[in-house]
Amino acid sequence: MLKISTDRLYNSEIKEEFLNNFDGTDDTISTLYYTLKKASVSEKEAKKDLYEMTANELDTVFHTASRRTENSVRGFISNIMTYIKWATEQGYRSTNLPIYTAESIASKASEYVCKTATTYYTQEDLMEYYKKINNRGDVMILQCIFEGIRGRGYSEIFNLKAKDLYKKDDKYFVNLYDTEKGTERLDFEISEFLYELMLDVDTLTSVATVSNKKVELVPSQYILKKTSKGNRGNLLGEKLTTSYLNNKNIHYKEIFGSDDFKYKDVERSGVMHYLNELMKQKDTNVAETEEYIKISDRFSLGKYYHAHYQKEIVNYSAIKGMIDIDFYEENYGEIELS
């Protein structure tokens, strides 16, 4: 059963009445709770409940929420309006409700995106950005990083081959090879989306450039292939290198509308998504050693060789440092890092 602390909300009794009587799943109620929790900062400053605010005051709430993506902005505003509509129906609001339709929210969403905050993404956020990317290989790279596939110099990505993909008992797996570090990770579970995406990218013989021009790909055993444009000699079978991703970063900055776009932020986003999946299997909201070890294994993070004990040790503090509490709680629910 969902446990939330409404005493942390402004006008907590009314907020509790709203949440207790809302007909929805625990996930939906949790999302509404964290929206109200975020908005409570503005409510306390204005000394007004959301349902008492004017359109201009609500505009300030939307700005100060510091949403990092348009998708997040739309969800935040929609949740606020759901609460205000309920409050109006209960007779708490005496003035007319500001009109925010799905269309008007979508058209204004970009105005409220916080451009200065470090940006993390849910899987849903990434799916929205993927729609803007012409090259499916570019989508695959980001999804790989999000799901924990990287390796030293991103060699796990560049070494991917279709023959290393397989499906078993309705689950999807890939064998990973980090040739820069000299390690392998066999039977690495991935999402169905990434599995299908890899197979799709492997069949590509050409890609569209940013300017929408068609460029032929050089045949290769690797899923990600080099383009024939500007290359000389026989490149058959050659794989990509780190410089490829360095160049792609410019394109991703344009897609994500951020000069601060970093692959590391996509990875941290994936860590938080994975932690949420792990926490769904627990009866508490306390993340412990078991979760940190699984995150360390999946993302190859926080491990070092301890000379005294002569074995590999997981640095739990490093794993905890990957978790942005505010982002996690706003998107996945309350968490305690033990």
Image: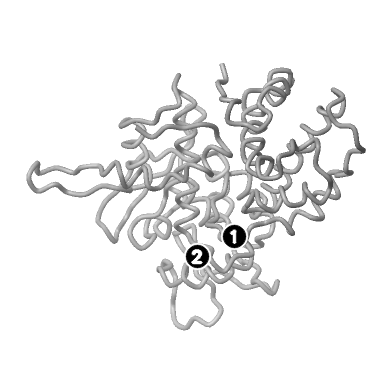
Check disc 1 and give the amino acid type: Leu
Does 185 appear above or below 89?
below
Residue placed under numbered mark 2 in the picture: 225
Residue 329 percent coordinates (x, y): 53, 37
| Label of residue 37 in the image | none
Q: Residue at x 56, y 58 (%)?
A: 117
Q: Quadrant of the C terminus?
A: top left
Residue placed under numbered mark 1 in the picture: 204
| Nearer to us in this view, 157 or 129 | 129
Mark 2 crowd level (few <14, some 14–19, many ≥20, 10 Å Cα):
many
Check disc 2 and give the amino acid type: Lys
Indicate the secondary structure of the residue bearing disc 2.
loop
Q: Residue at x 45, y 36 (%)?
A: 275
Q: Would you identify the image quadrant in which residue 36 lies?
A: top right
Mark 1 crowd level (few <14, some 14–19, many ≥20, 10 Å Cα):
some
Indicate the secondary structure of the residue bearing disc 1.
loop
- The answer for how far apart the CA atoms under marks 2 and 1 are is 9 Å
